[in-house]
Image: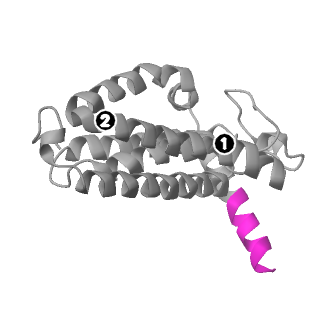
């Protein structure tokens, strides 16, 4: 068996193992995690906290964060999915009948996962721009949140593990670039330029 075939087989096996380890409680938790609408209050609250913490610096930080997340979504949804045309597992003829689908199926193509790209863009950006010695709980929390959201996509049969892994890498790379731009700008701005300096 060739290497591509081995990787494809592993992808399918991992998908089925995760999808078949289901229960009513997990169905509810994973469906909740994948619903983008339920996270809107979290995003609004996070944006408000970033404005309070970074003060004037937030007006550079928030557009960069938004750009990272927006590009992650656009690249995965508008470039990779139509370019590769890889069917979601729940649309694949050789897998659909074997899957447990508590949340339906969704769009036709699944490579790469936009959920994973978006969530890891946000989590990676926060991990890199927040002070290294502070907010450890928040950093762990957003990383666990991104992992949970990404795992839910495989659990629900909407994505292969490789879709999620690839999406997470795209999101993390874009976030790292955005965070580098923010740090470069911050290094050139005297602390007096921030309202409430000393918070950053």
Which of discs 1 and 2 lies nearer the camera? The answer is 2
* CA separation in Å, label 1 and label 2: 23 Å
Which residue is tagged 2? 58
Q: Chief secondary structure of the magenta span?
A: helix
Of residues 79 and 93, the one nearer the viewer is 79
Taking the spot 24% from the left edge, 56% from the top edge, the residue there is 187
Give x and y (percent) for residue 102: 67, 27
Residue 149: assigned label: none
The stretch of residues the image draws in magenta is 1-12
- Left or right: where does residue 53 sit relative to residue 98? left
Q: Residues within 10 Å of mark 1 (few under 14, many from 20)?
A: some
Taking 197 as reference, is 18 above or below it?
below
Taking 79 as reference, is 59 above or below it?
above
User: Looking at this rendering, what residue extends furthest in the right direction?
Assistant: 93
Give x and y (percent) for residue 4: 77, 73
Q: Is residue 176 magenta?
A: no
Image quadrant in which the N terminus is located: bottom right
- Left or right: where does residue 25 sit relative to residue 186? right
Give x and y (percent) for residue 92: 85, 46
Taking the spot 71% from the left edge, 36% from the top edge, the residue there is 100
Q: Is residue 10 magenta?
A: yes
Of residues 199 and 89, the one nearer the viewer is 199
* Disc 1 element: helix
Which residue is tagged 1? 74
- Left or right: where does residue 20 sit relative to residue 195? right
Taking the spot 44% from the left edge, 43% from the top edge, the residue there is 64
Taking the spot 34% from the left edge, 45% from the top edge, the residue there is 126
Is residue 58 shown to the viewer in this render? Answer: yes
């Amino acid at each position: 068996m060739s290497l591509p075939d081995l990787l494809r087989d592993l992808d399918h096996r991992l998908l089925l193992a995760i999808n078949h380890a289901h229960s009513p409680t997990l169905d509810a938790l994973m469906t909740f995690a994948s619903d983008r609408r339920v996270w809107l209050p979290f995003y609004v609250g996070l944006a408000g906290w970033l404005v309070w913490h970074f003060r004037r610096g937030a007006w550079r930080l928030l557009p960069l964060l938004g750009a990272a997340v927006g590009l992650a979504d656009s690249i995965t949804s508008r470039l990779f999915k139509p370019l590769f045309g890889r069917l979601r597992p729940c649309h694949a003829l050789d897998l659909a009948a074997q899957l447990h689908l508590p949340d339906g199926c969704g769009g036709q193509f699944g490579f790469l996962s936009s959920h994973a790209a978006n969530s890891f863009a946000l989590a990676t950006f926060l991990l890199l721009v927040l002070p290294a010695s502070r907010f450890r709980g928040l950093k762990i929390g957003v990383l666990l949140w991104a992992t949970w959201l990404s795992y839910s996509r495989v659990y629900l049969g909407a994505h292969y593990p490789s879709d999620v892994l690839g999406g997470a890498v795209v999101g993390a790379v874009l976030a790292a670039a955005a965070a580098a731009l923010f740090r470069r700008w911050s290094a050139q701005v005297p602390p007096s330029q921030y309202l409430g300096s000393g918070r950053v």
